[in-house]
């Protein structure tokens, strides 16, 4: 897995960065624009600490009608209470055992 950085850290790093490229009006030498060079951008991004992330696991609920159980396709954990709330009948969005996001289509 590669390194990941937070968007807010990138925005903050560039907001606080000191410009090193300047565009002047050649006639009256007024500053028209300022920016950050490609080399400096690379240094700024390289200095942002990496974020602590975990790869998202994906799965789906597999219902076995013969056994009357539902299993997570990712960890094969059987779940008796398939629904978070029996009244709404909404299944768990994440496997309570392995944390897989249940967004895969059909059975694997
Ligand atoms: Zn699972």
Image (cartoon, helix red, strand yellow):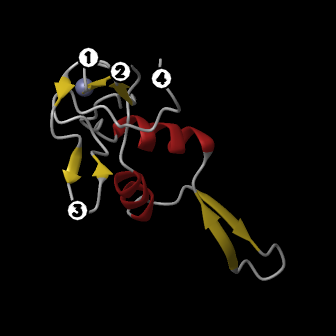
Mark 4 and mark 1 lie on one chain; the one further toward the N terminus is 1
Q: How far apart are the two marked residues, 3 and 1, measured between alpha carbons?
A: 25 Å
Count of numbered tags: 4
Residue 101 position by quadrant: top left
Q: Are marks 2 and 4 in contact (CB under 8 Å)?
A: yes
| Mark drawn on residue 107 | 4
In the image, the residue with mark 2 has its CB under 8 Å from the nearest atom of ligand 1: yes
As drawn, 87 above or below 50: below
In the image, the residue with mark 1 has its CB under 8 Å from the nearest atom of ligand 1: yes
The residue tagged 2 is 73
Task: Give the farthest residue toward the right.
Answer: 27
Q: How far apart are the two marked residues, 4 and 3, measured between alpha carbons?
A: 25 Å
Residue at 36%, 48% in the rendered image: 6
Camera-side residue of 2 and 101: 101
Give the left or right position of residue 69, taking residue 8 as reference. left
Picture quadrant of ligand 1: top left
Q: Dot 3, how many residues are within 10 Å of its Cα: few (below 14), some (14-19), or many (20+)? A: few
- Give the number of the mark in front: 4 or 3: 3
Residue 21 position by quadrant: bottom right
Residue at 36%, 60% in the rendered image: 12
Q: Are marks 4 and 3 in contact (CB under 8 Å)?
A: no
The residue tagged 3 is 87
């Amino acid at each position: 897995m590669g390194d990941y950085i937070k968007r807010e850290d990138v925005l903050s790093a560039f907001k606080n960065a000191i410009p090193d490229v300047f565009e002047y009006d050649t006639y009256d030498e007024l500053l028209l624009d300022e920016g950050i060079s490609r080399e400096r951008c690379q240094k700024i991004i390289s200095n942002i600490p990496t974020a602590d992330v975990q790869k998202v696991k994906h799965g789906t609920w597999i219902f076995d009608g013969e056994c009357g159980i539902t299993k997570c396709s990712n960890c094969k954990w059987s779940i008796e209470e398939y629904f978070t709330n029996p009244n709404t009948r909404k299944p768990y969005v994440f496997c309570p055992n392995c944390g897989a996001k249940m967004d895969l289509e059909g059975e694997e």
